[in-house]
Image: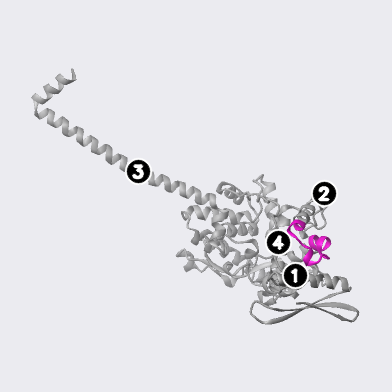
Amino acid sequence: MASIIKRNGKYAVVLNYTDQEGKRRQKWETFPTKKEAQAYKAKLDYSQAMGTQMVVSSTKTVDELLEEFISKYGTQNWSHGYYYKAQSLVKHYISPYIGNMKLKDLSPRFIENYYHNLMQADSALSPKQFGKKKTDTQKVSARTVKEIHKLLHSAFRQGERWEMVESNPFDKVITPKYKEVPRDIWELDDLKKALEACDNPILELCINLAFSCSLRLGEILGLTWDCVHISNELIESNSAWIYVEKQLQRITVDAAEAIDSDSIRLKFPSVNTRVKTILVLKDPKTRSSVRKIFLPRTVAEMLKERKRQVGMYKNYLGDEYNDYNLVVCYENGTPMEGDKIRQFFQKLIKDNDLRPVVFHSLRHSSTTYKLKLSGGDIKAVQGDTGHSEAAMITERYAHILDDDRRINAEKFEEMFYQQKNDDVSASKADELLSIMKKLQESPELLELLKGLIK
């Protein structure tokens, strides 16, 4: 049974209970008035009488849970990018609406109403939209609500483990429907047309690396010469390769300070000391993203030419060259960020009336083409793309695999069923020839058959 203790002018409800490991525990919840304490004690007593343990925190708020969740769980398990994203979701969409709510007051019905009302609110500007004018039609999307739900569901699941909540109310919540729009990609003819029109050597190299090696843009920009193996012997034997082990990314200073920095290989110096973000060279997205990729000979030769150009810049600038060993960089060696490559890419599309796509779609074009070339060999393609699970490929590129299965059905028809039908026809033809031969050898039988026919 729970008990009430008065201390420092407030009332604490003390519950003694046994946890899942059989250890004796004690839970204290403090209330400003005796009436609130008595009401909470009554709930605890009822819960114990029904054979359940109610150790719900009545005073903790959503903001308090999220703060503890992010500081203890997020900093240990999230990437720098997701840490910033989670902080933004809390700041713009969670704290202003339900941050002060008590954990015990959240129910599935309330949460679904919260999501519904949220989709009627104005969307916060993303970092890429800073400085742009926001129109009245920019509302919180179902996709954003899905991200909010994912974060809150994870936080409350951890709250269950910490015994801050009795159960996770987000388990029973139905989120708004979100239909993902398939990304438009270039076909081979589109890609050839773009490369023929491209007069920017840096962009041309990036396009070829994205397509031939299935690289993410950050992986291209984080590629260093020590990971590029393009000796004449390797090129001649079609064995030239690159090793993907890091990526270039801009992260917030807060994320860099909060999350273990072991994943950060290098922090590039900032011109302005008051900036809130920094450019870093860091470990890739997932462990599976670390991979060896073989190069087509043409792309290997392009990298060889690029290395010659970088050598010329180094000799010309001398000590003024900022040598970070980067493959893709400005003439003085400083890193070139993704926004600059995307700017080049969109200009190429606009100037040459190409089908509008985003740069990342080249990675999807690459995966699609490799699946077709390999006859649907998912594991081989997964090795190049760096996807953590093969299921990610089968889900996203199911239409390619369906086409392969259709071709397999055609092959079955040709090699088995059609052959079977041909064998039957051949058998019938042999029987007919045998009958004709017998008729030719027996004139009496032939005359009898003619009489029957008449």
Label 4: which residue? 170
Q: Is tag 2's residue or tag 4's residue first in the polypeptide sequence? A: 2
Query: Does residue 76 show up magenta in the picture?
Result: no
Within 10 Å of the Cα at label 1, are there few (<14), some (14-19), or many (20+) other Cα atoms? Answer: some
Q: Nearer the viewer, mark 2 or mark 1?
A: 1
Real-space Cα separation, disc 1 to disc 4, in angstroms? 24 Å
Q: Which residues are magenta?
A: 92-111
325 versus 363 height, above or below: below
User: Which secondary structure lies at badge 3?
Assistant: helix
Secondary structure mostly seen in magenta is helix
User: Which secondary structure lies at badge 2?
Assistant: loop
127 versus 448 height, above or below: below
- Residue lying at the far right of the rendered structure: 9
Q: Is tag 1's residue or tag 4's residue first in the polypeptide sequence? A: 1
Q: In the drawing, what numbered circle is on residue 136?
A: none
Q: Are marks 2 and 1 in contact (CB under 8 Å)?
A: no
User: Which secondary structure lies at badge 4?
Assistant: helix
User: Which secondary structure lies at badge 1?
Assistant: helix
Q: Is tag 3's residue or tag 2's residue first in the polypeptide sequence? A: 2
Name the residue type under label 3: Tyr
Label 1: which residue? 46
Label 2: which residue? 135
Q: Is residue 245 left or right of residue 350?
A: left
Label 3: which residue? 417
Name the residue type under label 1: Tyr
